[in-house]
Amino acid sequence: MSELVGIHFAPTADKLVIRLHATDNIAVARVSISAGSTVRVGDEEFVAKENIPSGHKIALRPIATGEQVIRYGQRIGPARRAIAVGERVHTHNLGYEELEFAYEYPEGDTPIPTPPAGGPTFWGYVREDGRVGTRNYVAVVAASNCAAHTAELIAESFRNEELPANIDGVVAFPHGEGCAMSIGPDTIQLQRTLAGVLGHPNVAAAIILGLGCETNQISHYLGDSAPRSSRLIGMTLQESGGTTGALETARQHIRKLMAECAGEKRTEVPASKLIVGLNCGGSDSFSGITANPALGVASDMLAAVGAAAVLAETTEIFGAEHLLVRRARNRDVAEKLLGFVKSYKVYLNRFGGSFDDNPSPGNKEGGLTNILEKSLGAAAKAGTSPLNDAVDYAAPIVEPGFNFMNTPGYDPVSLTGLVAGGCNIIAFTTGRGSAIGFPTVPVLKISTNTSTGRRMKDNMDINAGVIADGEATIEQVGRDIFETLLRVASGEKTKAEILGHREFVPWRIGPVM
């Protein structure tokens, strides 16, 4: 990837493609290449045998049937048939197979460094448990689908009301779960998720709202042991007079809660208080060339100051997990990471699925052929820092530096797990374009290419496509992401916040009863 640094883009023969590693037998088209065009890579020239769309792969040398196609210096799959120099390499001639790795486990235990004093800061809301919020919301969380509509009515009733200056809004968390679900891992995971939302540092106060008879009883979230229980109210529709009675009662509670929060204000805190979720969606072939490695630079900067950067999406590290195992701070962390990959494979097998089901039609349209290629680019978001911990879905993030969370690749479910685990800001890269946000946590959107950055300018906060355009380096865009994260954490609104995106989807893993 370092070959990109300092390149000034012009659509000449030697600037048409990007070769990411010296051992690669393919390159990626910077722009659409017409059949018959001369392409130059280093000292070699060849002719494109067919039209190559922007972001798609072109063969640099003959590839025999069954021979591995190499990108990033890594295997991404066998050739289905012989591929000639200058041919496009994609789903029609590139296959998929699960790879076996000889994992290089860490020896010993890498200590977690103490963050340096006097580093960068941001302005946030300090909570009684020491965590820091980047926003200050009142949350109305449905315990089940049966209370979802009323939760939305409660939040909507405050839309046009003047709120205290320090309250960012009253937001609802409706969802389709909480009842007709099996008692066990599925219920436990939902309860962990909702508890993480209710006790989140970006939430000043909250209501947990149930129907009254659902599987997911509100009593689970109440009591002195509940996170930040002093500003948590439990209610049910059946005890409050139904939808109308619950609406009025909840409004009274919220007015009192906001009065209690009136004295809260932002104070200057060290950047080590940031917990940044790393996610990607609508990926394309440029994701692993521009936005993801640039976010990796920002992730390393966060780790250096004692903040946490949390990579997610287990389905999108498959095929790259061996690279993360090398970076684990000890054998235990490496085993936990691999345990999530193995258990996810079992989970998929129950339904006849495969990790390679992950690349969407949009991913493939953007030049990504299979999950191995996608994962190698997705893992770049985590930079080069040691992997300090690996945690399950919605589990608390407690270690600084690079962490991993076990989540699906489906964006709203992944973001929900990250936030429930304590992430107080999200950095989200996208190639095809994504508009996702979250009710209480700012989501910073980073486009991988300039076309998407311009076409969806109202959704994109940063255009990392300038890297492929030759207008900036990976390091420069990475620093821009880091500095923007600090500003957003201090209150600057992201495009997703301005547009009102508030997607929230818990991960349901079990059957419907």
Image (tube, rainbow, N blue to C red):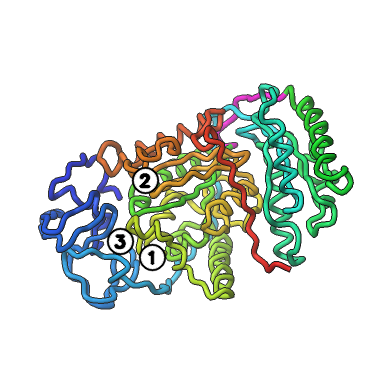
Q: Earlier in the sequence, mark 3 or mark 2?
A: 3
The residue located at (70%, 23%) in the rendering is 164
**In the rendering, which numbered label is found on residue 448?**
2
Question: Residue 464 lies in what quarter of the image?
Answer: top left
Q: Is residue 431 shown left or right of residue 270?
A: left
> Outermost residue, front direction?
244
Q: Is residue 253 shown left or right of residue 304?
A: right
The residue located at (45%, 38%) in the rendering is 459
Neighbours of disc 1 within 10 Å: few (<14), some (14-19), many (20+): many
Cα distance in 3D space between marks 3 and 2: 18 Å
> Is label 3 or label 2 in front?
2
Q: Nearer the viewer, residue 5 or 13?
A: 13
Q: Earlier in the sequence, mark 1 or mark 2?
A: 1
Q: Earlier in the sequence, mark 1 or mark 3?
A: 3
> Is label 1 or label 3 in front?
1
Percent x, y of residue 43 = 10, 55
**Magenta stretch?**
264-273
Local SS, label 3? strand
Q: Which residue is mark 1?
A: 370
Say if the magenta span includes residue 480: no
Neighbours of disc 3 within 10 Å: few (<14), some (14-19), many (20+): many
Cα distance in 3D space between marks 1 and 3: 12 Å
